[in-house]
Amino acid sequence: MAKKKKIDNQPDNSLADNVHIKNAGTVKDEKIVDTLKLNYMPYAMSVILSRAIPQIDGFKPSHRKLLYTMYNMGLLQGATIKSANIVGRTMQLNPHGDASIYETMIRLSRGNESLLYPYVESKGNFGKAYSKNMMYAASRYTEAKLAPIAKELFEDINKNTVDFVDNYDNSMKEPTLLPVTFPSVLANVTTGIAVGMASSIASFNLKELCETTIAVIKNPDHEISETLLAPDFVGGGYIIYDKDELDKIYKTGRGSVKVRSKYKYDKSYNCIDITEIPPTTTSEAIIDKIVELVKTNKVKELSDVRDETDRKGLRITLDLKRGVDADALMTKLYKLTPLEDTFSCNFNILINGYPRVLGVGDILKEWISFRLECIKRRTSFTLNKKSEKLHLLEGLERILLDIDKAISIIRNTDAESDVVPNLMIGFGIDKVQAEYVAEIKLRHLNREYILKRTKDIELLKTEIEELQGILDSKNKQKRIIVNELKDVSDKYSGDRKSQILYEVEQYDDSQQDEIPDYPVTLFITKEGYLNKIRTANLRMSGEQKVKEGDCVEKTFECSNKDELLAFTDKGQVYKARLDDFADGKASQLGTYVASKLEMEQDEKVVYICVIREYVGYMIFVFENGKVAKVDITAYQTKTNRKKLLKAYSLKSPLACCEYIEEDTEFVLSSSSGRMLILNTGALTPKTSKDTIGVSVMTQKKNHKVDSMHKYVEGEFEKAWRFRTKNLPAAGALPGPSDNAQQISF
């Protein structure tokens, strides 16, 4: 092979990209399992441990970093400060950007109404969790500080109760957990989606939660459901009590809770005001669903739906039609809309760095173990501090025996570095005590000062003895936790926001089929308009109004409970109940069928029929002379489906079709002029809708079947000429006398 000729003055850079990269350009075989281990698993572990799953203190890292920053800023007291200031300071611990930090603050705030017990007091527009349209203001406009209950998150955090680690750039320390004095992990809703797992923790009333925790401390086998009645959500509503499901949640950490909206009926305005909704939905989602039900005539009791949410809180107003039972309507809406929704529980939390799905009892036991460790560490820290102080005071006490000697030793010592050793020798004290004595100011070297300082020695000894007793007794440690839980319950707990319903009325689906039965007359125009008029009102009506150039093509005498089938040129059939169409008047154009049935844009109706009972057949005549007889039950469905595909065969163009309740005779006409009388009893019915049928009328080249009508006795002078014993048949040409007697349809 000839070498490529190098262009003059052009450097050879063919390997320039690979010069500084070792093994660049080489293809290496690697198992997919190894790739997952090296690349994907570290990412998955990071998301699970550092992002999405809460720990035993009830917080994800982002929550903990924000709250600890606010604590360090002194925001437990004083006035609120700009949120932007807080967000900026939090970035010292959380490097993921100001937007995510601010969104974390939003969810923790009282104004957003996401948490049952919010940790951040807010000032300004923090949005609303129950509305996706009510967005929060920018951080430069809002203000915040820590809520009073946040004090319980940081109690004794500076007494070695929890571990501290370096932040992301090793410039400061942050806690790995917060020493919470109550089971905050179950006090607020927490949700998160990790990699391969998720977490969804319901919130519980603080008073019930503290009582349950105290009961578990006293008796590890305590029945949780005796004191913890059910979850409690910030949005209120009704909890539908299901003991088996709640016991499952309490034992396994998995299950679901049904939450209903709360409403009140305003008789003076004949409307329903919905004021509390489930935590899993929004006011917009509820309104959109109700509007959809009204448009599809599944809910006919409403005249208007609107969102009247204001500064006072959530309110969705439903205007009722005259005579509507409000309670019955709400029972129906609970079934058909998110006004009743399910909160799925998956109590997945990190325990010692491992994700575990635990029941309420097991979570409380883990929290008690965590809190016991905090108590021991705090007690040890305090004990060490008091022991150090006692040690110093004992050295000071010895100086009390001879203050003049101490002054003499210091005065007669030539070198400063010898002061401490000389004091150690002169009074028999150690270096720490001697250093403390040497640092005392000259003005304090008097008997009064020393007596004041040393009289606390006995008190310190008593306190140290008590602290040591706490360290040596697990029961005393538990007693401390119990007292702290009682204090938290007294300070911050309140009444339940979500009421419990032990007996509820469920919506019966069969009620949906109770359609008013009264005679109606249908007028269907050539352009596809349908007008339904009560037959009783028809006599008082004038001539049916139609658009210019349109005309009434079919008229049906039927019942309001009947069903309508509309076959289209795309081989599909659309189903609807006549009750879905509003009663009209002769002066109205009616409803455009294609729009009402939500047909495709370029789809056209080719045939409409009304079905009272699914008895009879559909007769499809194709241009190639084949005829299909399909049992009408093939179009019957158990569910309320609106559209059926493959309603008839599209292998040959459809000439015409007809619904018959029983077998009859039709006259088929060909473009060649021939006619054939067909008795449908000669055809075998099929259950498959898109059957191609059987050959009935043979066609010569360039000819096709173009029409069909029911045979009327006497239409032909010699009808036998148009009948045949065997199919297919060509039919016969009508004579002059037949044409004369032919009836026009």
Image (spheres, rainbow, N blue to C red):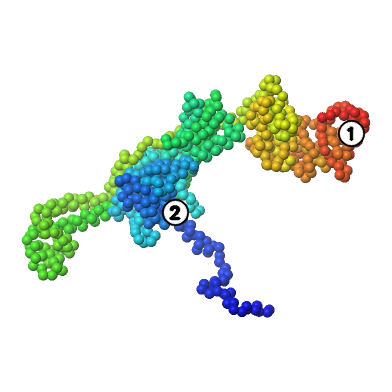
Crowding near pointer 1: few (<14 within 10 Å), some, many (20+)? many
Disc with the residue nearer the chain's start (2 vs 1): 2
| Coordinates of residue 50 in the picture (x, y in percent) | 43, 55
Of residues 327 and 273, the one drawn nearer to the viewer in this rendering: 273
Question: Which residue is at the far right?
Answer: 736
Structural distance between the alpha carbons of marks 2 and 1: 83 Å
Q: Residue at x 80, y 31 (%)?
A: 663
| Coordinates of residue 509 in the picture (x, y in percent) | 58, 32
Judge left or right: residue 701 versus residue 68.
right
User: Does 581 sit above or below residue 245?
Assistant: above
**Tag 2, which secondary structure?**
helix
Q: Is residue 332 visible to the viewer in this orientation of the structure?
A: yes
Which residue position holds label 2?
A: 51
| Type of amino acid at the residue the image marks with label 2 | Arg
Of residues 716 and 288, the one drawn nearer to the viewer in this rendering: 288
Q: Is residue 351 visible to the viewer in this orientation of the structure?
A: no
| Type of amino acid at the residue the image marks with label 1 | Phe
Of residues 313 and 65, the one drawn nearer to the viewer in this rendering: 313
Q: Residue at x 34, y 40 (%)?
A: 492
Judge left or right: residue 243 versus residue 458.
right
* Rendering quarter of residue 517: top right
Q: Residue at x 42, y 41 (%)?
A: 113
**Tag 1, which secondary structure?**
helix
User: Does 254 sit above or below residue 578?
Assistant: below
